[in-house]
Image: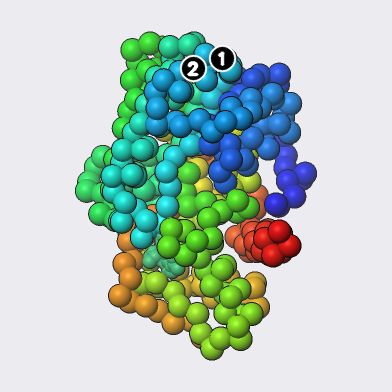
């Protein structure tokens, strides 16, 4: 985890003060949800714990029963079926259907039991494949999606629209945020389903330990991506929960990007792998570039504080700690 003690206080008085509020983070066992829960707890919120026996968020009756009992004041919807380029392409039904069910159950039930505030999370893949860079919120639905993650993207677009619909039809104070590519503690390091950054950390680490001559990177290495540490993102999301109320979704990112090849070299340097980086061009590249325009977020008074280099180093320490724990267990 990256030390956040130096983070400045919010620049403005919140429109929704969180102190003392009971907030349920759907997906609080995941990378993003657990980071949001830590940030909320640091602000003096009561983070409503998950039901001890695992709740199936795809089941409307289970979600309704749980929320009627837990009665949070606010909800952050960080629960989703997520995965990298290969997983998305391989399990289209899971990515479309599970995400539609999860978000519809939570948002609809929140309205029915009178939850006063809700933040829905999507992702930068909602935008057209060839959107102008950096991508502004207004680019939504202006062109065709990237084929490899269209299933996830369509579900998330429906979620944004559902939040807007509850605002319009019922006056609910619900909002949406679209984070860029996230990484950090709690990430998925499985090479078949992970995103690129945890995959590269694992590959560089294993290549270093094995004294291998090379490590393999998928695709041409030329696509560019924007990476944000999950603690930085959680800080921005909680800031939005306190400071933002409008129909439009808000991009959450760090306003800079890097090519996959440069990223592989950076990860290798931080980890200490000195061998060759080999490109496997039989693997897909996905979207050529997706850098978010974060003007709306910075205009509200928030800015990113964790550099990519610090974030990767912290995530690598977490990965090593976990590997050690697994080998002891
Ligand atoms: P995307 O942002 O939805 O395309 O998802 P990913 O994070 O899975 O992939 C981002 C880019 O990194 C794509 O161009 C991948 O081909 C590339 N990449 C390079 N090596 C890897 C790897 O080992 N795993 C993954 N998931 N992507 C990789």
Mark identifier at residue 65: 2
- Classed neighbour count for the residue bearing mark 1: other residues with Cα under 10 Å, few (<14), some (14–19), many (≥20): few
Q: Quadrant of ligand 1?
A: bottom left
Q: Is residue 73 above or below residue 326?
A: above
**What residue appears at the point 64 percent right and 73 percent down from the top-left corner?**
271
Q: Quadrant of the C terminus?
A: bottom right
- Does the CB distance between marks 1 and 2 fall below 8 Å? yes
Query: Label 1 belongs to which residue?
Result: 69
x then y, percent, for residue 309: 63, 64
Q: Is residue 13 above or below residue 279?
A: above
How many numbered markers are drawn?
2
x then y, percent, for residue 174: 46, 22
Whole-angstrom CA distance, mark 1 to mark 2, is 6 Å
**What residue appears at the point 61 percent right and 86 percent down from the top-left corner?**
211
Q: Is residue 246 visible?
A: no
Q: In this view, does 319 lie above or below 14?
A: below
């Amino acid at each position: 985890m990256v030390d956040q003690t130096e983070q400045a206080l919010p620049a403005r008085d919140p429109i929704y003060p969180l102190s003392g509020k009971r907030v349920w983070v759907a997906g609080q066992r995941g990378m993003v949800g657990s980071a949001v829960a830590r940030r909320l707890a640091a602000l003096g919120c009561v983070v409503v714990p998950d039901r001890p026996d695992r709740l199936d968020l795809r089941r409307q009756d289970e979600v309704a029963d749980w929320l009627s009992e837990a009665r949070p004041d606010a909800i952050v919807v960080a629960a989703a079926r997520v995965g990298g380029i290969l997983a998305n392409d391989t399990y289209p039904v899971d990515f479309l259907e599970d995400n539609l069910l999860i978000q519809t159950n939570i948002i609809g039930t929140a309205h029915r039991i009178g939850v006063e505030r809700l933040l829905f999370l999507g992702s930068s893949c909602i935008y057209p494949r060839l959107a102008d860079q950096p991508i502004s919120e207004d680019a939504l639905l202006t062109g065709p999606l990237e084929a490899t993650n269209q299933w996830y993207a369509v579900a998330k677009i429906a979620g944004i629209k559902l939040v807007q619909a509850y605002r319009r039809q019922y006056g609910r104070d619900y909002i949406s945020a679209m984070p860029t590519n996230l990484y950090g503690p709690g990430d998925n390091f499985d090479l078949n389903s992970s995103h690129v950054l945890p995959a590269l950390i694992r590959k560089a680490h294993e290549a270093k330990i094995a004294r291998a001559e090379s490590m393999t990177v998928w695709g041409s290495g030329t696509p560019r991506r924007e990476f944000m540490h999950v603690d930085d993102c959680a800080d921005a999301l909680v800031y939005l929960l306190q400071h933002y109320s409008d129909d439009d979704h808000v991009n959450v990112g760090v306003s800079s990007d890097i090519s996959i090849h440069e990223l592989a070299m950076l990860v290798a340097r931080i980890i200490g792998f000195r061998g060759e980086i080999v490109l496997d061009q039989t693997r897909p590249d996905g979207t050529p570039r997706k850098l978010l325009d974060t003007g709306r977020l910075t205009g509200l008074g928030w800015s990113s504080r964790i550099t990519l280099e610090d974030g990767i180093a912290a995530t690598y320490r977490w990965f090593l700690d976990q590997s050690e724990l697994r080998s002891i267990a």
